[in-house]
C-alpha cells in the first residue's frame, strides 16, 4: 500500500503561510520559492498547491499544469541569473532520494565549470532574499 500524503510536511506549512519562504512565483496551481539549502545560486523549488506526496501521487491534471509552471519559472530564473543552463531534479519516495514528501521540482541554474554544492548546507537569508528579488523582477505572466 502506498504511503499517504501528510499535510503537515514543511511545504504544506509554507503553502498555509505557517513558515516563511522567499517566493518567486505563485498562482492557483503552484508556488515557487528559494531552496534554503541551495545546491546552486538561485536554486528554486516549484510545488503544487494540491496535496500530492510525489510524482506518482499527483493528479494528471495538476501535473500537466505544474510542469508548465516549472518550465516558465526555469526560463525566468535562467534569464534573471544569466545562467548557462538549468538542471531539473525530481525525487519520488525515500529510495528515489525524496526527503520532503510533498511533490517538488528542483530548478538549479548552472554555469560552465561550476559544480553543484553538496546537499544540506543552509544559505544566508539575505542572499536568498536578493536572489528572489532579482527573479521576481524578471518574472512575466504565464503564457496561454
Image: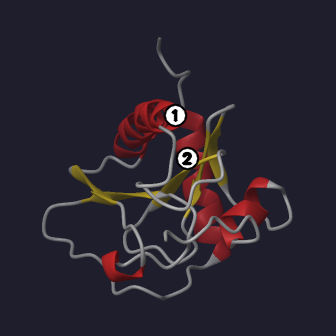
Furthest residue toward right: 18
Residue that protrudes farthest toward the top in the picture: 144
Q: Position of residue 135 (x, y in %)?
A: 53, 44
Above or below residue 100? Residue 119 is: below
Q: What residue is shown with label 1?
A: 138
Where disc 2 sits, the SS reads: helix
Residue sitting at x 38%, y 75%? 39
Q: Quadrant of residue 95?
A: bottom left
| Camera-nearest residue between 53 and 35 | 53
Instruction: Tell me what residue is drawn at x 52 percent, y 34 percent.
Output: 138
- Residue carrying label 2: 134
Q: Is residue 32 left or right of residue 41?
A: right
Please tell me in which quadrant of the rendered image residue 34 appears.
Answer: bottom right
Task: Say how many tags the image has.
Answer: 2
Label drawn at residue 105: none
* Above-or-below relation of 37 to 49: below
Question: At numbered mark 1, what does the secondary structure look like: helix, strand or loop?
Answer: helix
**C-beta proximity under 8 Å, tags 1 and 2:** yes
Counting from the top left corner in percent of width and height, residue 80 is at: 43, 42
**Residue at 51% across, 48% down:** 58
Left or right: 56 as drawn, with respect to 37:
left
Residue 75 image point, x, y percent? 36, 36
Q: Nearer the viewer, residue 15 or 94?
A: 94
Residue 69's spot in the image, x, y percent? 47, 35
Task: Identify the residue at image location x=59%, y=36%.
Answer: 137
How far apart marks 1 and 2 lie (CA) works out to 7 Å
Q: On the rendered structure, is 122 left or right of 98?
A: right
Residue with the most extreme left position: 113
> From the viewer's perspective, is residue 113 above or below residue 15?
below
| Label 1: few (<14), some (14–19) or many (≥20) C-alpha neighbours in 10 Å | some
Amino acid at each position: 500500500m502506498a504511503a499517504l500524503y501528510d499535510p503537515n510536511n514543511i511545504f504544506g506549512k509554507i503553502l498555509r503561510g505557517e513558515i516563511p519562504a522567499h517566493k518567486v512565483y505563485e498562482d492557483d496551481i503552484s508556488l515557487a520559492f528559494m531552496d534554503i539549502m541551495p545546491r546552486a545560486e538561485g536554486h528554486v523549488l516549484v510545488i503544487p498547491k494540491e496535496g500530492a506526496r510525489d510524482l506518482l501521487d499527483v493528479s494528471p491534471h495538476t501535473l500537466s499544469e505544474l510542469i508548465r509552471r516549472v518550465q516558465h519559472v526555469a526560463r525566468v530564473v535562467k534569464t534573471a541569473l544569466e545562467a548557462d543552463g538549468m538542471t531539473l531534479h525530481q525525487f519520488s519516495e525515500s529510495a528515489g532520494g525524496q526527503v520532503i514528501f510533498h511533490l517538488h521540482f528542483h530548478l538549479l541554474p548552472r554555469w560552465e565549470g561550476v559544480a553543484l554544492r553538496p546537499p544540506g548546507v543552509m544559505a544566508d537569508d539575505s542572499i536568498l532574499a536578493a536572489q528572489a528579488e532579482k527573479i521576481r523582477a524578471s518574472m512575466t505572466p504565464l503564457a496561454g
